[in-house]
Image (tube, rainbow, N blue to C red):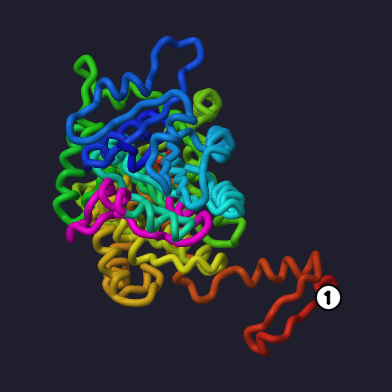
Amino acid sequence: IKSQIGIIGLGVMGGNLALNVLSKGFHLSVFNRQVLGKEENVAKNFVETHANKKTSLLGFDHLSPFIDSLETPRTILIMVKSGEAVDAIINEITPLLNANDCVIDGGNSHYKDTIRRELSFDTININFLGVGISGGAEGALNGPSIMPGGSKKGYKQAKKILDAIAAKDINNTPCSAYIGPGGSGHFVKMVHNSIEYGEMQLLAEIYQLLRYVAKKSPEDIATIFENWSTRKKNSYLLEITIKILRKKDNGAYLIDKILDKTGQNGTGNWSAVEGIRAGIPIDTIIASVMARNISSRKEQRVLTSEIYRLDYKIPEVEETFINQLEEAYYVVSIINHSIGFDLLQRISERNSWELNLSEIAQIWTNGCIIRSDLMQTIALLFSEGTYQDLLLFPEIVALMKTNISSLQTSLQSGLLSGFALPVMSGAANYFFAYTTANSSANLIQAQRDFFGAHTYQRIDKSLNDFFHTDWKI
Ligand code: 6PG
């Protein structure tokens, strides 16, 4: 029997996706290179461990027989580390492929690499898809959220398998849909990750305030978060945070033993760069990347904390502080999502991708890392018609108006205590700047005109006219 799909790379994601594909009854071939100097044959072991009677599972450590084992036109999913490894595999398999085969890159590739790869496959009539896959190892196994972009023909061919392995939303619709041309699938996954960065940092900041301002134990905080989750604020990230806070190690909280130095693989950073490059305000995204960057300077932070010895008096807070934090948490989360969707919309317009943000929100309601009650609400709001900024829906306006003061007071207590609250501050800055009709940018324009004769417009004259003043006289 020829296989209906081939998977290249049996790392955590590739291996779990392979098991997911098998469980849906597809005939599958897997390829993993024999690791130099190691006896172990990864593909062979995989087949020995997971072979079943219902579907055929074939394992290879050479590409040519692997490619030959696939039904034509072929569907091949590459699950190797993004970057050079993807190009290396593509270069090796390309001579073995035929026109109309479909090659899928399911890693966290940069969307510009995806555009380049699609163009080069296009010249030989091979259909290339750059597919964002979210949900971590568990999602890959049980149903991830899938963001396929690129060749429409390729998508038509792969749709059946992608729909089968994807998570399902509340209406049992697959959390997978064609995103758009070129690198749009990977772009959308990149923005997904940057919303993820914002939400993670927000939870870390709220945790810090509960722990050190409200003086709650990790167990107390887990219980507080559990309460929040019953009030339409549940999310996958909140759920895992509750579990993390409860985890003990030799009788003590494990969280207290983990080094406060954050790793990152690049997608948050790429989003920040894309937003800045396009002149889009993305305060919470930038703030979450900067928070990771500064966290990595652990040795310097220890040194400067000793030099400065800033012993702030933590203000006394009342029990209402926790209610305020709950409101602040929700408000910042809404702003962070609004920023993420705005970034998608504006880049979509620039590239004529015609991204369907309603469908993207739906894809994100299950399977992915940022699935949440809020995402359900957003999917519902966006399904109502043409896209508009999340912050402009009347329900959201009402909610923001009632709760924004809680963000102000939470920030006040946190900053007075000497805590860095980059995402909460970034969200507040974005919100206040965005809702201010007359800002201080007039002074910037005057300064630019002063030293560079860059000219300015006047509110008492036609906006078609530009003025220059000789400021020194
Ligand atoms: C997902 C995750 C996944 C991965 C990221 C995390 O959606 O399943 O986002 O793609 O965990 O690589 O990124 P950092 O390593 O940069 O935190």
**Range drawn in magenta:** 160-189
Q: Which residue corresponds to the image point at 80% horizontal and 77% vertical from the top-left?
A: 469
Left or right relative to 349: residue 165 = left
For disc 1, the marked residue is: 470
Query: Against 472, is 132 above or below?
Result: above
Query: Against 30, is 238 above or below?
Result: below
Query: Against 339, is 238 above or below?
Result: above
The part of the image, by quadrant, that contains residue 59 is: top left
Q: Which residue corresponds to the image point at 19% horizontal and 17% vertical from the top-left?
A: 251
- Residue 294 lies, in percent from the top left, at 52, 36
Magenta span main SS: loop
Q: Nearer the viewer, residue 98 or 142?
A: 98
The part of the image, by quadrant, that contains residue 3 is: top left
Which residue, as the protein is rendered here, is positioned at the far right? 473
Left or right relative to 287: residue 279 = right
| Residue 82 lies in the magenta-colored region | no
Tally of marks = 1
Q: Which residue corresponds to the image point at 30% horizontal and 36% vertical from the top-left?
A: 1
- Residue 77 lies, in percent from the top left, at 41, 41
Left or right relative to 264: residue 245 = left
| Residue 184 lies in the magenta-colored region | yes
- Residue 347 lies, in percent from the top left, at 53, 63
Q: Is residue 154 visible?
A: yes
SS for callout 1: loop
Q: Is residue 426 visible?
A: no
The amino acid sitting under disc 1 is Asp
Query: Against 295, is 288 above or below?
Result: below
Where, quadrant-wise, is the C terminus in this rendering? bottom right
The part of the image, by quadrant, that contains residue 312 is: top left
Q: Which residue corresponds to the image point at 48% horizontal and 56% vertical from the top-left?
A: 150
Q: Residues within 10 Å of mark 1 (few under 14, many from 20)?
A: few
- Residue 130 lies, in percent from the top left, at 47, 49
